[in-house]
Image: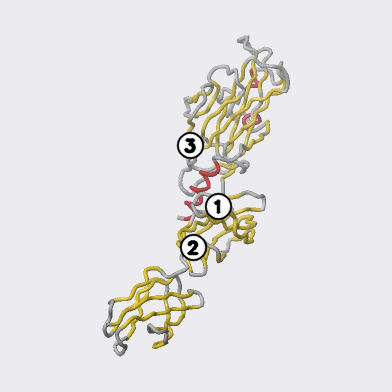
């Protein structure tokens, strides 16, 4: 559950990060073994450089891919829409227009179940008679940039393709309706790896105590995990670093971590973990909340007034030993005993049958729970 939350919370944060540029290489399978993934893209293995000059009037044509997934190079997220931009580059000249074709496969060069959306005005989706779906320019484009959103759908929850291969070919043209003078590229291939969380966090809890808030978390596995940063917030939006704790690096064994925040605010406190790997990549845990109070809550004595016996009800944030003392109106100690509190609601019996009628003060103390004063009437 928490792992899925971490995924959900981490995907939303990635969309706001800086753009990362992928770099590809030419001469992939579409060009070398005639698999025809780009250029046409028919079954003959044609690429743009077959019909247009491989190095024409505009020199060498290359392709860059730009994604909005932030600082995680060559990674994709299954089932999550990701924006991608294609930039067609030339080494010389000023083309009249540009074009491209793109196709995605799995690591065995089989077509993938990919959904393309948010196509730019200069992009269209095409389908061959064999069912192969690909993207290409929608007429000659005056812009050398093409934008779309893709989403890779796995066959099952345990069947995520890795890597996803992106084949792209491109052309720069002079617009004379002839191939002469144009420049066309070979096939460029880009690998997109499956995103994996650096830490599988299965439990993260915040437990209030009278002396602070105890934070505990468990990792089932860690991958290149450098350290955790415990972050604290009073509004659930703006967080400050309060503690750095070293991670375990890479391990498939369960590890437990703990930290006591001794300076929480009265009321709600919000916490999250920033998980940093050795490459300085960051992910975030879900946000957990703890309501802190330096005093007991909902402490009552009933009945009021009492004749022979009274019951003290109080809530304790933790298991704790302590003492209970009773003083009369003149400050004289008339009763004392040790008590044992358990986390949650507690009921303490008080025999007052032989006390004289009047006003009494009950004082409850503990090393960790502090002191609680209760006023009581005996009839």
Q: Measured from the top left, where is residue 284 in percent x and y?
A: 55, 52
Q: Nearer the viewer, mark 3 or mark 2?
A: 2
| Location of residue 47 (image quadrant) | top right
Extreme residue in the top direction: 176
Residue 107 in view (yes/no)? no
Tell me the quarter of the image containing the C terminus.
bottom left
Q: Residue furthest front?
A: 330
Badge 1: residue crowd in 10 Å (few <14, some 14–19, many ≥20): some
Q: Nearer the viewer, residue 320 or 123?
A: 320
Answer with left or right where residue 24 lies relative to residue 367: right
User: Which residue does the image show at 34% across and 73% down from the upper left?
Assistant: 300
Residue drawn where x is 69% and y is 16% of the image: 94
Occupied quadrant, residue 344: bottom left
Tell me, for residue 206, which label it has, or none.
Answer: 2
| Residue 113, numbered circle | 3
Residue receiving disc 1: 239
Q: Residues within 10 Å of mark 3 (few under 14, many from 20)?
A: some
Q: Nearer the viewer, mark 2 or mark 1?
A: 1
């Amino acid at each position: 559950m928490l792992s899925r939350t971490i995924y959900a919370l981490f995907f939303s944060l990635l969309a706001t990060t800086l753009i990362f540029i992928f770099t590809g290489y030419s001469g992939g399978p579409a060009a070398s073994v005639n698999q025809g993934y780009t250029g046409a893209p028919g079954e003959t293995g044609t690429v743009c450089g077959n019909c247009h000059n491989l190095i024409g009037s505009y020199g060498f044509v290359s392709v860059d891919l730009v994604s909005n997934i932030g600082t995680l190079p060559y990674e994709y997220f299954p089932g999550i829409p990701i924006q991608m931009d294609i930039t067609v580059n030339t080494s010389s000249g000023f083309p009249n227009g540009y074009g491209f074709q793109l196709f995605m496969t799995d690591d065995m060069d089989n077509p993938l179940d990919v959904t393309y959306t948010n196509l730019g005005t200069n992009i269209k989706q095409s389908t061959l008679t064999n069912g192969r779906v690909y993207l290409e320019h929608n007429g000659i484009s005056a812009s050398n940039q093409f934008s779309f959103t893709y989403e890779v759908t796995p066959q099952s929850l345990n069947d995520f393709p890795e890597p996803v291969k992106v084949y792209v070919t491109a052309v720069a043209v002079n617009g004379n309706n002839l191939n002469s003078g144009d420049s066309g590229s070979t096939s460029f291939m880009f690998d997109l790896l499956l995103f994996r969380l650096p830490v599988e966090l299965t439990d993260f809890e915040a437990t209030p105590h009278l002396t602070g808030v105890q934070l505990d978390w468990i990792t089932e596995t860690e991958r290149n995990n450098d350290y955790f940063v415990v972050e604290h917030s009073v509004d659930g939006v703006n967080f400050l670093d309060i503690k750095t704790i070293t991670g375990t690096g890479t391990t498939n064994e369960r590890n437990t971590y703990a930290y006591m925040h001794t300076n929480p605010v009265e009321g709600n406190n919000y916490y999250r973990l920033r998980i940093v790997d050795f490459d300085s990549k960051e992910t975030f845990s879900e946000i957990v909340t703890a309501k802190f109070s330096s005093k007991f809550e909902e402490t009552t004595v009933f009945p009021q007034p009492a004749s022979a016996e009274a019951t003290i009800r109080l809530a304790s944030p933790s298991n704790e030993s302590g003492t209970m003392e009773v003083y009369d109106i003149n400050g004289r100690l008339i009763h004392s005993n040790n008590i044992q509190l358990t986390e949650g609601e507690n009921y303490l019996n008080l025999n007052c049958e032989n006390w004289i009628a009047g006003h009494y003060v009950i004082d409850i103390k503990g090393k960790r729970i502090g002191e609680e004063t209760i006023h009581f009437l005996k009839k």
